[in-house]
């Protein structure tokens, strides 16, 4: 690990529980492997992977408070499921607390939970790495999705989005507008 990543890693470790920290390392290394495969910047992938869940372990009521204090918009679905806020709050904290200035890295952190239409390569890499990292509980079609991530990144997104929406519907969870938009965008792509 280079010095910058190492410094952030040490600081971040104290803010996450053991499971989340292990998941974070899994996402960081999976993102760097995907960057190697798809000719993306490895350093950006490591940094975005490392910080993608930096706000995950903040209690939900504090997440709402922090969003309001920093004038980050909260949708109805987010208000009902404040955990979703860890993505936009994570981008804010990456900038303010971990001094990340790379706009592309901040965007990849911000969109890692719902995805968004027309994602950059780095955004796709983080969105996918979060889903396929080796420590992730087995999800439907995981072996196939993992292979696709290295073979056909947009087809991988389509499969992931289809399975994620089916999962949310099966559990009767409200679907965030952005999750839905992302799904329809990549379905048509
Ligand atoms: O933070 P992680 O657990 O590593 O992963 P994540 O940031 O992708 O968050 C996953 C959770 O987000 C998972 O429990 C499903 C939920 N999620 C994603 N999109 C939506 C959603 N939950 C609701 N209610 N609506 C969505 O559109
Ligand atoms: Fe997350
Ligand atoms: Fe994650």
Image (spheres, grey):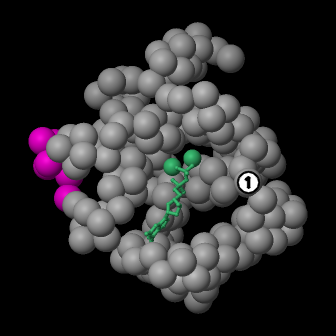
State which quarter of the image contains the N terminus: top right
Q: In front here: 35 or 111?
A: 111
State which quarter of the image contains the C terminus: bottom right
Residue tagged 1: 137
Q: Quadrant of residue 21?
A: top right
Q: Is residue 145 in view from this perspective?
A: no
Residue at the far front in the pictured view: 171
Residue 175, image x, y percentages: 42, 77
Say whether residue 66 is magenta. Answer: no
Q: What residue do we see at 29% from left, 28% from top?
A: 96
Residue 119, relative to residue 24: is it above or below?
below
Mark 1 residue crowding within 10 angstroms, few (<14) / some (14–19) / many (20+): few
Q: Quadrant of residue 156?
A: bottom right
Q: Is residue 90 in view from this perspective?
A: yes
Query: Does the magenta stretch mainly form a helix, a strand or a loop?
Result: loop
Q: What residue do we see at 73% from left, 54% from top?
A: 137
The magenta stretch spans which residues? 68-73
Residue 182, image x, y percentages: 49, 75
Q: What residue do we see at 45% from left, 24% from top?
A: 15
Q: Is residue 165 left or right of residue 101?
A: right
Residue 63, image x, y percentages: 28, 44
Q: Is residue 185 left or right of residue 138?
A: left
């Amino acid at each position: 690990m280079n010095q910058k990543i190492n410094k952030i890693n040490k600081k971040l470790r104290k803010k996450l529980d053991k499971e989340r920290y292990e998941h974070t390392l899994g996402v960081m290394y999976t993102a760097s492997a995907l960057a190697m495969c798809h000719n993306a910047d490895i350093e950006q992938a490591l940094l975005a992977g490392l910080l993608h869940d930096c706000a995950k372990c903040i209690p939900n009521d504090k997440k709402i408070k922090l969003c309001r204090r920093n004038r980050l918009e909260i949708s109805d679905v987010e208000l009902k499921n404040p955990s979703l806020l860890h993505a936009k709050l994570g981008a804010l904290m990456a900038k303010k607390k971990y001094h990340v200035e790379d706009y592309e890295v901040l965007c990849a952190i911000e969109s890692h939970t719902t995805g968004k239409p027309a994602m950059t390569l780095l955004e796709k890499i983080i969105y996918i790495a979060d889903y396929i990292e080796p420590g992730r509980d087995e999800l439907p079609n995981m072996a196939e999705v993992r292979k696709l991530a290295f073979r056909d990144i947009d087809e991988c997104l389509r499969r992931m989005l289809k399975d994620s929406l089916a999962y949310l519907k099966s559990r009767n969870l409200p679907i965030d507008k952005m999750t839905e938009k992302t799904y329809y965008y990549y379905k048509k792509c």
